[in-house]
Amino acid sequence: MSKFKLASRIKGIAIVAACSVAGALALVSSGPAQAGETEVYTISVGGLLYDKWYKIVDGTVPKKTHPSYGDKGKKSGKGTWRCKECHGWDYKGKDGVYAKGSHYSGIKGIRGSAGKDPKAIAAIIRDKTHGYTKDHLTDKEVNALALFVSKGQYDMDKYIDSKTKAVKGDAEKGKPYYETMCSKCHGLDGKKVKDMKAVAYYSNKNPWEILHKIANGQPAEAMPAMRILDDQILLDILAYSMTLPKE
């Protein structure tokens, strides 16, 4: 049986049916895996694991800094076991947004693994360098993470300018999507969630992270995974979110 905590921590992952005439949300169970689960669902789960795996699994959560994190990094503790902490939200590691600043680790990204055999990637996740044992992640979870690395990465440079953070989206087109799919939780102004800053604060500061979360959801929260939608729609939603009040 899967050890995903999504069943207890998240009531459901809302996937928008792109072919729906009404454009309604189809709520997909986030409980134990069933035969015939779609690839896009598994990739979205892998995206959550890439973000913060220890929020959604029953495995052991490391307390000490990852042994492969190295002495170039400025972080410590369990946060260094997050895939994104070394490989970045743009998946380019030391060659991308994390080339400098507090998240610099000197570790390369995962862009070179895009399109590779998920089984080979799963083996890398299990190797001595990465060190994710079955005490951390089950085989099913590792396979979902590997599938994300192989098939779920976005080529961020095509969508977001690395220097200006400009997003290749249409805010006007993104507005109705945001209003109908995001505002119930985040509010029309993006400030409804009290324990976080305004949506626009995050989307303008780190659009790569927000695109990742729009596509895959937020670990341990009832945020829908919208990966099933066309990439351009996700960019339009992101572009609109950047126009909302930052405070």
Image (tube, rainbow, N blue to C red):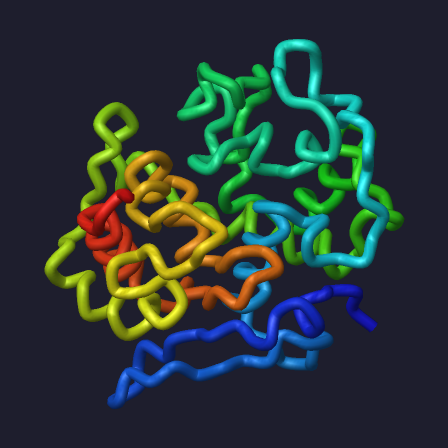
Report the residue that reaches farthest toward the right.
Answer: 135
Q: Residue at x 71, y 46 (%)?
A: 122
x, y (%) of residue 83?
A: 62, 38
Q: Quadrant of residue 38?
A: bottom right
Q: Quadrant of the N terminus?
A: bottom right
Q: Is residue 11 left or right of residue 246?
A: right
Q: Is residue 164 left or right of residue 41?
A: left
Q: Is residue 219 left or right of residue 217?
A: right
Q: Nearer the viewer, residue 111 or 170?
A: 170
Report the residue that reaches farthest toward the top.
Answer: 71
The relative height of residue 154 versus residue 22 in the rendered view (above or below) is: above
Q: Residue at x 41, y 25 (%)?
A: 97
x, y (%) of residue 72?
A: 63, 10
The relative height of residue 57 versus residue 110 in the rendered view (above or below) is: below
The relative height of residue 189 versus residue 1 in the rendered view (above or below) is: above
Q: Quadrant of the C terminus?
A: top left
Q: Nearer the viewer, residue 234 or 127?
A: 234
Q: Residue at x 19, y 70 (%)?
A: 176
x, y (%) of residue 194?
A: 44, 55
Q: Quadrant of residue 19?
A: bottom left
Q: Nearer the viewer, residue 220 or 125?
A: 220
The relative height of residue 228 versus residue 189 in the rendered view (above or below) is: below
Q: Residue at x 20, y 36 (%)?
A: 166
x, y (%) of residue 197?
A: 40, 46
